[in-house]
Amino acid sequence: MSRSAELFERAKDVFPGGVNSPVRAFRAVGGTPFFVARAAGCRLTDADGRTYVDYVCSWGPLILGHAPAAVLDAVRQAAERGWTYGAPCEVEVELGEAVRHRMPALEMMRFVNSGTEATMAAVRLARAATGRELILKFEGCYHGHADGFLVRAGSGVATLGLPDSPGVPAGIAGLTMTAPFNDAPAVEAVFRSHGDRIAAVIVEPFVGNAGFIPPVPEFHPALRRLCDRHGALLIFDEVMTGFRVAAGGAQERLGIRPDLTTLGKIIGGGFPVGAYGGRADLMRQIAPEGPVYQAGTLSGNPVAMAAGLATLRETARAGFYEALERRTARLVAGIGDAARRRGIPVTLGHAGSMWGVYFTPGPVRTYADAKGADTALFARWHGAALARGVYLPPSAFEAAFISNAHTDADLDFTVTQLDAALDEARAR
Ligand code: KE4
């Protein structure tokens, strides 16, 4: 039995499914998850000494790859000054100012410890600020595991949500409506039926939790227009896209100014950090300045702040995003060529260094389109790729990433291995 398999048996005795987050259990692709012993640059090394070129990048935070020197130095220096104060410190302010410099729509913000906390707080603020209760989200978009987000679409577009997990009260799920992503007419219909009760629309500007689904050009302008017309707030959930799809995130790439934005992942550089922020008139309603309560023991943690600040500074270098997008385009094109040479229907997409592959003719504009892809072929491809030293996200419904630690040689190696893995996947 491999060391990873041994560890997995022990882990299953102490954690549900043997993991601390469900997707890591490989249930969507089959097989046993490897246990990581160490990581550096673009590679992971498992407990049995096998190495993999990593395209999960810890689900988004690691835009600089694993253990980059600049972040490691910043973390070491911060830790030597003590690693949690429960009191304000300078590096919090420095990171807040750095975030705002890149995303001016965050006139004010609050640091928390995860994306889930950020979206929970942003929705609470939107409800307080508008005096309304309903939230509109989109099918296939994930905003963390707070009760109000674990809902599935009701029968019709304008119906209220149904619980999508045991333990979520119908009364809470019923305050969330869902509509298809990229479907502006459907959103218009929801606003026609409930417009004066909608506190906020929350959206992943580029969907990364259903694979990779980019917005059609008219979608986000329509959301902005409908929110303005009906007095609802627009929340861009940029936990994944923030500082990933552009230097200023999706809001810069799309030219949309949301009322509130949620962040996570990259702003912590791999340490637990989330944030929510936006219009100052809204954020000033947050305690202690205002009445809307939100708090956190480790919020603004000095080591995590130092990691996030070092990460943002590295990504601010000239040409960083352009080079990363060029390399992502090259990788995606190589995968597309491999599939098309075999006559395998494929739909590929990327924005910045976030990318995705669906085995379907496409186009993929909605979650329903994505669900039509050949997930069994993806699962076989994933296993064959892993055996060849390439680690893709263990689900067809997750976006993949590259980091600036992925060199052209790593990408060439990857395309060669993924090409061979397609033969094996198709044959089985
Ligand atoms: P966290 O609570 O996991 O830090 O963030 C929740 C969240 C909020 N919004 C968006 C757009 C997100 O992508 C996420 C978390 N992303 C998943 C990846 N699909 C985290 C991976 C996992 O759950 O293990």
Image (cartoon, rainbow, N blue to C red):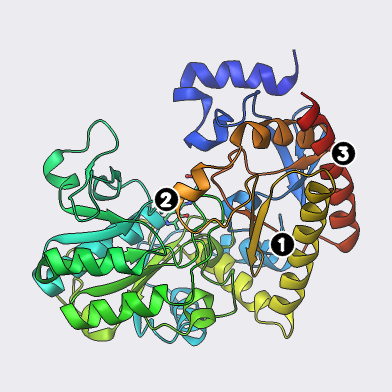
Q: Position of residue 3 (x, y in %)?
A: 73, 20
Asked if residue 237 is positioned above or below residue 217 in the image, the reply reads above
- In the rendering, which numbered label is found on residue 140? 2
Q: Which residue lies under the disc numbered 3?
A: 420
What residue is drawn where x is 24% and y is 63%? 123
- The residue positioned farthest toward the top in the image shown: 1
Q: Quadrant of residue 190?
A: bottom left
Marks 1 and 2, Cα distance to the nearest angstrom? 25 Å
Q: Say the numbered circle drawn on residue 122.
A: none
Q: Is residue 296 visible?
A: no
Look at 55% across and 50% down and name the residue there.
211
Instruction: Inspect this view and state whether residue 428 appears.
Output: yes
How many numbered discs sit on the rendered protein?
A: 3
- Residue 357 location (% of width, % of height): 65, 51
Q: Which residue lies at the image location 28% right of the left edge and 46% below the top edge?
A: 153
User: Residue 422, relative to residue 67: is it above or below?
Assistant: above
Looking at the rendered structure, the kind of residue marked 2 is Gly
Image marks 1 and 2: residues in contact by CB distance under 8 Å: no
Residue 97 as seen in the image, left or right of residue 111: right
Residue 282 lies, in percent from the top left, at 22, 79
Distance from disc 3 to disc 2, alpha carbons, whole Å, reads: 31 Å
The percent position of residue 352, horizontal first and vertical second, equals 64, 70
Q: Residues within 10 Å of mark 3 (few under 14, many from 20)?
A: some
Q: Quadrant of residue 157?
A: bottom left
Decide which of tag 1 and tag 2 comes sooner along the chain. Answer: 2
Give me the residue at 24% from left, 77% from top. Answer: 227
